[in-house]
Image (cartoon, helix red, strand yellow):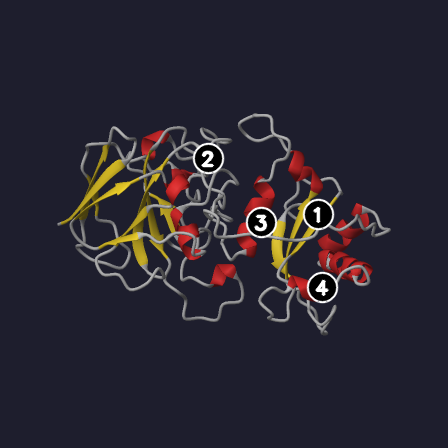
Amino acid sequence: KSSYGKLQIEGTVLDVYNTGNTSRYYNNMYERGQDADYLIIKEALEYYDNQIDYSEYDSNNDGYIDALYIVYTAPIDYESDTSLWWAFTYEYFTEDYEYYDGVEADYYCFLGYDFLFEKPSSGKKISLNTETIIHETGHLLGLDDYYDYDNKKGPDGGIGGGDMMDYNVGDHNPFSKILMGWVTPYVVTNHSTINLSSFGQTGMCILLVDQYSSIYDEYYLIDYYTPDGLNKLEAGNNGLFSCGGIRIYHVDARITKNDADSILDIYDFDNSYTNHRLISLVQTSGSNSIDKGSFSTNEDLLKYNVDYNIFKWYSKDNLEFVINAVLKADFTVDVTIVKK
């Protein structure tokens, strides 16, 4: 749904594999700095090797299994950030080649079975909670975390919580969907008026910059958020807006010239360790509460029929746009942009 039908994921759910060891055994290994998750993956791959043809799961024929989801039944450790029993996505590195039907394991998602039965923040009843596995799938597709790992470095607070790659709620934002090729933005470099329908339903969004070169640059993204569809479950919780309105994001996705060994290394900036963020939500309310670790609120959406000036850039001097949004009777929004 998030990709508007562009992404189809297929896979096989295999029977349960019992490792023969306790969760404490593996967690003790992990806390001693040993790759307990690697050991589990290797044993599981060997166990299933005579049951399936791993080469069928290399859809792009690059010699690697596209992705593994390792779902453990050990109790999730909500108290320790050094425990193995949490959720993460990583790459399976081995000193020697390990071939299974001519292919190797590579990226994998590691998460607990109990995540599927967590109560959502909204408290609404659902049969399965897929928020964690959707977030981790975002990493498998190449997306970074947008929350802040370290509040002592750079600005605090991520993008205010209300996003699948920040607080595991709602839909993906326009930046994420552009990166994955799910949407194509309207590129605006001067005066323009564009009618936007709900981003969640249509993928319509605006990329605002003085001169467009690529998506790997600094720019602003504008969309019309609505609290329905994939946003409905958690709307009003963890920074996800409970009313419709215009969102504005400031993006600086310039590519690093250094070697990139992980998702965090691809860009010059990230949302954890750099002096400004890869992506930030513009709080049109004028509040700076996200930088203090607070969730975004409905007041951060652009107010209708009020001019809003965009003039804060990291790499561009004296560049200013004025934005005005008008809600139409058909519940679309006319966004008018003027370059000053």
- The residue where tag 2 is placed is 229
The answer to which of marks 2 and 1 sits earlier in the sequence is: 1
Task: Identify the mark at residue 54; answer none if there is no mark.
Answer: 4
Amino acid type indicated by mark 2: Gly
| Cα gap from disc 3 to disc 4, whole angstroms | 22 Å
| Cα gap from disc 2 to disc 1, whole angstroms | 27 Å
Per the image, label 4 sits on a secondary structure element best described as helix
Vertical placement of residue 170 versus 33, above or below? above
Per the image, label 2 sits on a secondary structure element best described as helix
- The residue where tag 3 is placed is 136
Amino acid type indicated by mark 1: Val
- The residue where tag 1 is placed is 71
- Observer-side mark, 2 or 3, equals 2
The answer to which of marks 4 and 1 sits earlier in the sequence is: 4
Mark 1 Cα-neighbour bin, 10 Å: few <14, some 14–19, many ≥20:
some
Residue 173 appears left or right of 187: right
| Cα gap from disc 4 to disc 1, whole angstroms | 18 Å
The answer to which of marks 4 and 2 sits earlier in the sequence is: 4
> What residue is rendered at 63% in x and 35% in y?
128
